[in-house]
Each structure stands twice: as structure tokens, then as C-alpha cells.
Image (cartoon, rainbow, N blue to C red):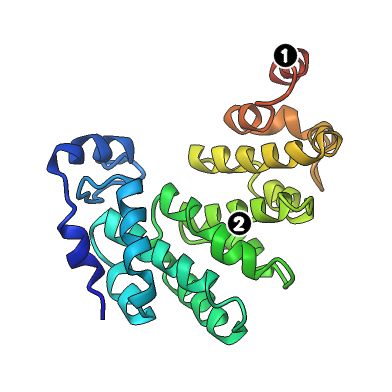
Amino acid sequence: MIDIEKRMMTLRDDSQVAGLSRFFKTGKGQYGEGDMFLGIKVPVTRQLVKEIWKDCSLDDVAAAVSSPWHEVRLCALLVLVQLYKHSKKDAERQSRYVDFYLANTRYINNWDLVDLSCGEIMGDWLMKRDRGVLYELARSGKTIWEQRIGIVTTISFARKSDFEDALAIADILLHHGHDLIHKATGWTLREVDKHDHQRLLAYLSSAAPGESAPRYTVMPRTMLRYAIEKFSDDERAHYMGR
């Protein structure tokens, strides 16, 4: 058995705590309110994961993923990613890891925890399976983090030039009120653009189902700015000018 939290405690760096707490918005009323940090940078966490994942079980991950310490939860999720990746020939084991991931989304409660895990696990698992769970998360997720899992996971499909779910879930989140969802959706649309510029142009210039105005005229400005980041200067000027 590997005590992930105990191993992480040996790596704490109090000099980094204040900066990480500010970066992940832990102040009153902010999206990361109340989260606690050990001051461990991601490369340090990744190095520990590399050292321990082979000796970790799902029970070890379960014990750590509910930790009050942000970096311990991240470490647990990165271990889970490795366990999932290295069970490619065992669909039953992979299914258990996916079920565990979905059952513990309440602990995947900041953007880095989402972004560094959902594609590696959910994106891979759903590549050739029904993706309805992502629509449920995007539409009915209890937190912005569950909704973010719904959209960010589709980046995995977009990288394979499979855009349907990315664009459909972007429509679900088109009028969302939170900046972190705007950024995640724009980031996803930018991935579509990398592989098919004309497809994104057509998406932005047409209306969402049930609406009449082109999407680029109604989506939040941050979402649009992220989506068109790689456009030419003239194209950006056109779309940002609305």
C-alpha cells in the first residue's frame, strides 16, 4: 500500500503556498475558495507519480483523492491516469477506473484537476463509445467542474478530427455564466480550428439550434477570443468587432 498523502507531505514547500493559493483563486467568493495547498509544483508531483504509480492500487487513489490538500488530489488523479493507461488490454479494469472517476467528481474541483485528467481517462474511454455522459455533465453537472469535464473531454475527439460532440456541447454551454466555462469552451473550439478552420468558421457564423443570431455574435467575449486566437488579424478583427 502506498500512502500518497504521506509521500506528498515530504515534498511540501511552504514558500510556494501563498502564490499557488492566489493563482488558484482560494479567496472568499472565488472559484477555489477554501482549497489548501502544500506548495508543490506540478513537475514535482509528476515525478512522484512516476516513482509510485506501479505500486499503487485503486484503494490508494481513493484514500488520496478526497484529501483536503489540492496537490494530493492532483497526485491521486495522475496516478489514476497511469493505472488507466497501463490497463489498455483489460476493458473491465479500465471500466472500474472510469466509474471511479465519475463517482468522485466532487473532488475534481479546480481547472487543473479537470484538465490534467479528463482527456486521459474519459476522452480515451469514450473514443469508441456512447458519449451521452458528457452531455449530461455539461447540461446538468452539479458544479462548473463537472460541466468543464463535459466540454474539455471532447478535445480528445477534436484532435482526431471528430468534431460533432465538441460543437454540440459548446452549444449547450454557449450562454453559460462562468468565465472558466467560457475559457474551456473557447479552448475546445480553438482545437477544432487547428484541424478544420472552415468547420469552425461555419460554426461561428451560423446560429445554434433554436436561435437566429450567428453564434459569434452571442457567445461570451472570452469564449470567442479563445476560439479565434489563431485566426488571421483580419479575421479576428471581424469576429471581435461583432
Q: Position of residue 71 (x, y in %)?
A: 29, 54
- Residue depicted at x 67% and y 68%: 126
Inter-mark Cα distance, 1 to 2: 29 Å
Q: Which residue is mark 1?
A: 233
| Occupied quadrant, residue 57 | bottom left
- Residue depicted at x 15% and y 57%: 10
Q: Is residue 69 above or below residue 190?
A: below
For residue 147, side relative to residue 4 (left or right): right
Q: Position of residue 44 (x, y in %)?
A: 30, 49
Q: Which residue is mark 2?
A: 153
Q: Is residue 6 above or below residue 28?
A: below
Where disc 1 sits, the SS reads helix
Q: Is residue 55 above or below residue 178?
A: below
Which quadrant of the rendered structure holds the N terminus?
bottom left
- From this viewpoint, which residue is outermost toward the front? 51
Q: Could you classify mark 1 by the number of other residues whose Cα lies within 10 Å: few (under 14), some (14-19), or many (20 or more)?
A: few
- Residue depicted at x 19% and y 41%: 17
Whether tag 1 and tag 2 are in contact, CB under 8 A, the answer is: no
For residue 56, side relative to residue 128 (left or right): left
Q: Position of residue 18 (x, y in %)?
A: 19, 36
For residue 72, side relative to residue 167 (left or right): left
Q: In the rendered picture of this protein, how many numbered marks are placed on residues? A: 2
**Closest to the observer: 223 or 232?**
232
Q: Could you classify mark 2 by the number of other residues whose Cα lies within 10 Å: few (under 14), some (14-19), or many (20 or more)?
A: many
Q: Amino acid at mark 2?
A: Thr
Q: Amino acid at mark 1?
A: Asp
